[in-house]
Amino acid sequence: MDRFGKIKMALKISLRFYMVSILIFMVSSLRTATGGVVKGRVTDQSGDALPGANVYIPGTLIGTSTNREGYFQIDHIPAGSYLLKVEFIGYQSRSKAFRIGDQDTVEIKFILSVQPVAGSGILVTTSRWGEITEQLSHLPVKTIRRLPVRVTGELLRTIPGVDAVRRGPVGLDPVVRGLRETEVGTYVDGTRYFPGGAARMDSPLSHFDPSAIYRLRVIKGPYALTLGAGNLSAIQAESPPLPWEQSGEIHGQLSAGHYSNLNAPETILSVQGNLDRVAFWVHGNWRKSSDYHSGNGEIVPADFKSREGRGKLGIKISSKSTLVFSGGYQYQNDIDYPGRLLNARFFKVYNANIRYRFEQSSGLVQTLEVLGYTNDVDHEMDNDNKPTAEPNPNRKPPFPLLVEVKTGSHVDGGRIALELKPSDRVTLKLGGDIYSANRNARRNISRRDNGMVLLKNDLVWPDVTITDGGLFTQFEHPLTPAIRVVGSARIDFVHANADTASQFFLENVSGELSQDETHLSGALMIESAVNRHWVVALGAGSAVRTADASERYSERFPASKAQTSAEFMGNPNIQPERSNQADVWIEATYPHLSLQVNAFVRRIENYITLQPTNFPKKLPLSPDVVFQYVNGEADFWGTETAIQYQLNPLVTLHGSFEYLWGQDNTLDEPALGIAPVRSNIGVKFNTKGERLGLDATVHLVGDQNRVARSRGEIPTKGYVTTDFRGFLRPRKNFEINFGVINATNTQYVNHLNAKNPFTGKPVPEPGRQFFARLSLIF
């Protein structure tokens, strides 16, 4: 039996164990328990609630997480003396001793002081008390606010195992352990986001500014089954929670910053408040960027302008229920894309959602959440300032072209989720979700010199609608005080259809345009606290992703899953991908040392890859070979490690390491977009009271010679860069962030970056850039 045959067997055993665990859950839910209750609240130094803080008794699996108001309650604690510990990312942990007897109730309040995360901006939250099915990699608000980033994709690049494809200055497209595009489910405040560009000029998160993000989490495998459908991995961004506990108060922050090299200013304003039973949050930002110089002085086109506004309005219906209305608008325009055949004229993005939430700390029903949303992206692109817009007697055709593409994406969806507590030791989640994503794109080509129309209303996406509705369940159950199990499962029903297709498509591609699918997915995790310092967890899961609009219906249009400008044909009969993955997590926590290690192995069945065809190309400037999407098989494995050591109360060392291997078995070559080995080493200094913080980090990236040559991928050289960052708080309500990125002005290319289709060279990263940001907190 080969390695992956053993993995399949392990998955089967895991599923059997899942069923056994359900039986254990059913039996244990009938038992009654005795003991005492400890409850309380966790806040920061200003009295603001810290939702999601981990509250537990070290060396056991007795624990919980705080709710949105910062409150916690742990029931049925056996009589005795204990130490209760609280951990929250970006804050110093606290512990308090207590003694409890049968039927006693003990109240404990924790006030945490800020302790910025390691300078890399990385903290992998392990399985301890955070739901491992939903929270594996996490960027908290303090880290997000202080990192020198202009787009959300740059934030994601700071997380081990996560990278992003640069095609231009915005829209860095996330890649999670080799998974990309719709293999990575993207969620903002629980709503599903899809890009608007047919060539993925935008990524879903490019329409949510990093300054509006309160928390960012990455789920690096098939463990996000309760978030939505088709998540082989997932990214979850959250905006700030409404300040329900700050009645009569209004707070905000005004920031202004600038990045040299890119000549990129930014202005950000955020205001939130509570007026008795009504709470609100209003946010706006403005950004602009210009061309930048890479390390060797090469000028890289990088113009763009971005304006964004969004907000929330919440009504407290009762002490246990809220109703929140949210919405946003973003306008980006005049965007350069050196890694694409075209530039973007604009993106217009509208989104809105309404959410009802009921929450209580006692009783069978713990929470009930109902969500409805709509997202819309309107997008236009053209070839202004591209070589094809100029005459060239040595090219066919020699005359200047005007290429225009108009695309749109519209998503409607909803979700309902119920969390039950049938016994003190068991949590059960039930729910369902649905989305309907419509994509439409048309292309026009004409001569710039005389206006002659060469191609009119050419179908790129033929008004495609993909609807996916599913039901999910998840249970969590401590088997012993030191071992717990979490299992989840979902079933999805998919319908895909295109209202029309070109005559060429209908004559040359087999299969009905209308397709229906049913998918089953499941995951299981078992976790053990070996002792008060070490936690080990094992996980396995299998998730299914349906093919996207391009993979099903594109008609000789360039693909974003390749480093070539060749034309690609869709395949309505293409089968959904199934990702089978197993993970191991190890965490060690000591007073001055923390260590996190995660390793995984994955096989994707029906992996969507490509094959050459004999189809004629549509455009004379395209490469001669036309490709088509087909199913195949691929294998991946890798590991990530993060470590942090506190030398003294002021100085902390931090580092990380990651490695990824992937193989497209069908094409017998490496999978596309496998990031090279990389590591970070750094030191940070923070004064008591967080008045001053400094960080120096060295990034080391290796060569990547394992490339997908059939997709046009080329080897890249390794590099070393150094960043310096710092902050200064001369007053409580005033902060200065400053630093230099790529201080050594190194010329380098991120291996995943797109190639310039006219030069064949990957888009380089910016050279040295200084940044500064002033923030006024009120």
Image (tube, rainbow, N blue to C red):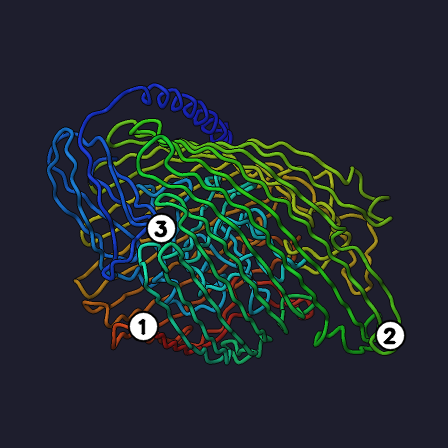
Which secondary structure lies at badge 1?
A: strand
Residue 299: x and y in percent read 57, 79
- In the picture, measured across the screen, residue 750 lies left or right of residue 669, that is left
Q: Amino acid at mark 3?
A: Val
Q: In the picture shown, does residue 205 fall above or below 20?
A: below
Question: Residue 249, how many percent across, how many down?
Answer: 32, 64
* Residue ID at (68%, 38%): 495
Residue 214, above or below 170: above
Find out whether the residues at labels 3 and 2 contact each other: C-beta distance under 8 Å: no
Count of marks, rendered view: 3
- Write the residue at 25% across / 45% down: 588
N-term mark: 3 or 1: 3
Q: Do callouts 3 and 1 mark residues in contact (Cβ within 8 Å)?
A: no
Could you say which is closer to the camera, residue 767 or residue 517? 517
Spatial CA span between label 3 and label 1: 22 Å
| Tag 3 secondary structure | loop
For discs 3 and 2, the disc positioned in front in the rendered view: 2
Kind of residue indicated by mark 2 = Gly
Label 3 vs 2, first from the N-terminus: 3
Residues under labels 3 and 2: Cα distance? 56 Å
Residue designated by label 2: 451
Q: CA distance from mark 2 to mark 1?
A: 55 Å
Residue 190 at x, y = what percent?
Answer: 49, 48
Q: Which residue is mark 3?
A: 124
Of mark 2 and mark 1, the one earlier in the sequence is 2
Placement of 260 over or under 530, stated as above or below: below
| Nearer to the camera, 292 or 659 | 292
Judged from the image, the secondary structure of the residue bearing numbered disc 2 is: loop
**Disc 1 target residue:** 726
Quarter of the rendering containing residue 519: top right
Q: Amino acid at mark 1?
A: Gly
Is 679 left, or right, of 707 in this rendering? left
